Image (spheres, helix red, strand yellow):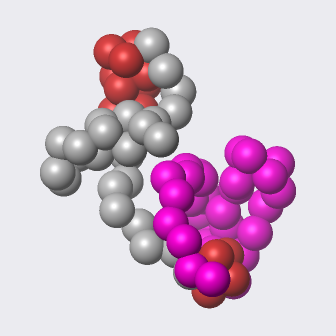
Amino acid sequence: MDFQFPHAWIELPNNIIFDGVLQQFYDKHGYYDTYKITKINEYTPVEAREFMLKTGRHDFWVLKNNLESCDV
């Protein structure tokens, strides 16, 4: 069964992913293939800080592209 849900991760140099929820490091290509990733938004560290300060949350920000809340 396929389903979608909002999730975030950190993309590091050398094709390394850090998933903060799972507290694990992954190969980027394997991570994208395994979890069938569709990247919707990408934030710089400054943007992430600004969203967190503006919303008071570290999760479920407003999507940049379509301005819909992804809060479930």
Residue 15: x percent and y percent?
A: 61, 73
How far from the left and from the top, in percent, is residue 29? 62, 83
Please tell me which residue is depicted at 57% across the width and 80% down the height of the picture.
Answer: 2
Residue sitting at x 38%, y 35%: 61
Does the magenta-highlighted stretch encompass residue 18?
yes
Q: For this rendering, which residue is in front, 42 or 55? A: 55
Quarter occupied by residue 44: top left
Q: Quadrant of the N terminus?
A: bottom right
Q: In the image, is 30 to the left or to the right of 69?
A: right
Find the magenta span and give its range. Answer: 1-30
Residue 4 forms part of the magenta stretch: yes
Q: Tell me the quarter of the picture where residue 27 sits.
A: bottom right
Question: In front: 71, or 12?
Answer: 71
Task: Reply above or below: 29 against 20.
Answer: below
Residue 43 seen: yes
> In the displayed structure, does residue 26 sit left or right of residue 57?
right
Q: Position of residue 42 (x, y in %)?
A: 37, 54
1 versus 71 height, above or below: below
Task: Using the rendered image of the protein, determine whether residue 44 is visible from the camera's viewpoint.
Answer: no
Position above or below: 40 against 43: below
Identify which residue is drawn at 70% across, 55% down: 18
